Amino acid sequence: MRHWNSRLRARILLAVTAALLCAVLVSGMFLGDRALETDFARKNWMPCADFIFGTDWMGRDMLARTLAGLSLSIRIGALTAVVSAVIALLLGVAAATLGPKVDAVISWCIDLVMGIPHILLVMLISLAFGKGFVGVVAGVSLSHWPSLSRVIRGEVIQLRQAAYVRTARKLGVSRGRIIRRHLLPHLLPQFLTGLILQFPHAILHEASVTFLGFGLPPEQPAIGVILSESMQYLTTGKWWLALFPGLALVLVVLLFAALGDRLRSLLDPASVHE
C-alpha cells in the first residue's frame, strides 16, 4: 500500500508541475503582443490591481513581459535540451561500444568541455554563431551534453557485461542490432530523466548569456533582456522591475527540477521505496 501511495503521489506531483509549466508556456505565447504594447501615461507604475507586476519605463505590462519571456525561455530550453540530450546519447553509446580508441577520443572531448568554465563556453559559442536566437541555441546545446554523455557511457559499459548481451554477441548478433534491441530500451529512463534535468540548466544559461549581452537581441521580451534593462532603474527605487521577473525565473527552474525528480521516481521503481 505504501508503495502505491508513493507512486500515486509522484504521479500527482508530476501532473501538477507539468500543468503549471504548460500554463506558463501557453499564456506567454498569447501575451506576446501585449508584452510589447507601450503607454507612457502609465510608465513606472508600482504593482497594483490593474498591473500585478507593475509597469516599466515605457508603460509596458511587466506581468505580460515576464510570462512572454518565460515562455520564450521554455521553448529555447526545450529545443536546446533535446539537441544536447541526443548528442549525449550518441556520444555516450559510441564511446562504450566502438572500441578503446573512440572511447579515448570522446572521453578527452568530455574532459575538455567540462574543463572550460560553463558560462564562458556558452558565450564563446554564441559569439561564434552570431549571437541572437541561433547563437543561444548553439551555445547551450553544444555545452550541456558532457555530464549526461558520461552517465550514458557508464550505463552502457555495465549493460555490455549483462548475460543476455554477451549471449547475443556469441550468437553473432550485429553490434547495431544489439544497440537497438538491448541497449537503447534500457537507456530510456536515464535519457528521459537527463533530458528533463537539462531544462533548468538550459533556461538559466540562456537567461545568463542574454543578460550579459551575448544572447537574444534587446527587442525580444526575454527574461535576460528584462533583468538586464531593469538594472539601471533599481537605484531609483523601481524594485519591481527585477524582483518579479527574477522570482518567476527561479520558480520555473525549480518546477523543472521537481519535474525531473518526479519522473526519475516513476521510471526507477526502487527510488519510490526510499
Image: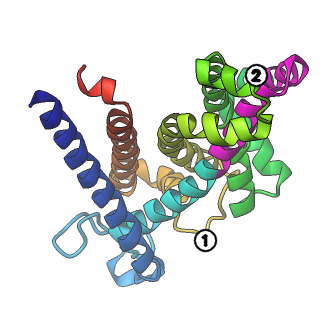
User: Which one is in front, 259 or 220?
Assistant: 259
Q: Dot 1 surroundings within 10 Å: few (below 14), some, or many (20 or more)?
A: few
Relative to 219, does residue 86 appear above or below in the rendering? above
Identify which residue, 18 or 103, lies in the foreground: 103
**Kind of element beneath mark 2:** helix
Instruction: State the image coordinates of residue 228 (x, y, percent, origin top left).
Output: 54, 52
In the image shown, does 135 or 177 lie closer to the viewer?
Answer: 177
Which numbered tag is attached to residue 150? Answer: none
Evaluate whether residue 143 shows in this view: no
Q: Is residue 207 above or below residue 167?
A: below
* Colour setup of the view: rainbow
Tell whether position 100 is magenta: yes
Residue at image mark 1: 219
The answer to which image quadrant residue 42 occupies is: bottom left
Quarter containing the C terminus:
top left
Query: Of the residues shown, which amino acid type is indicated by label 2?
Result: Lys
> Whole-Å distance between the Cαs marked 2 and 1?
61 Å
For disc 2, the marked residue is: 170
User: Secondary structure under badge 1?
Assistant: loop
> Which residue in the rendered view is the most extreme toward the front?
171
**Category of crowding for the residue at label 2, using alpha-carbon neighbours closer than 10 angstroms: few (below 14), some (14–19), many (at least 20):** few
Name the quadrant of the N terminus.
top left
Q: Amino acid at mark 1?
A: Glu
> In x, y percent, where is residue 30?
40, 79
**Which residue is painted at 17% across and 42% down in the image?**
8
Q: Which residues are magenta?
A: 83-109
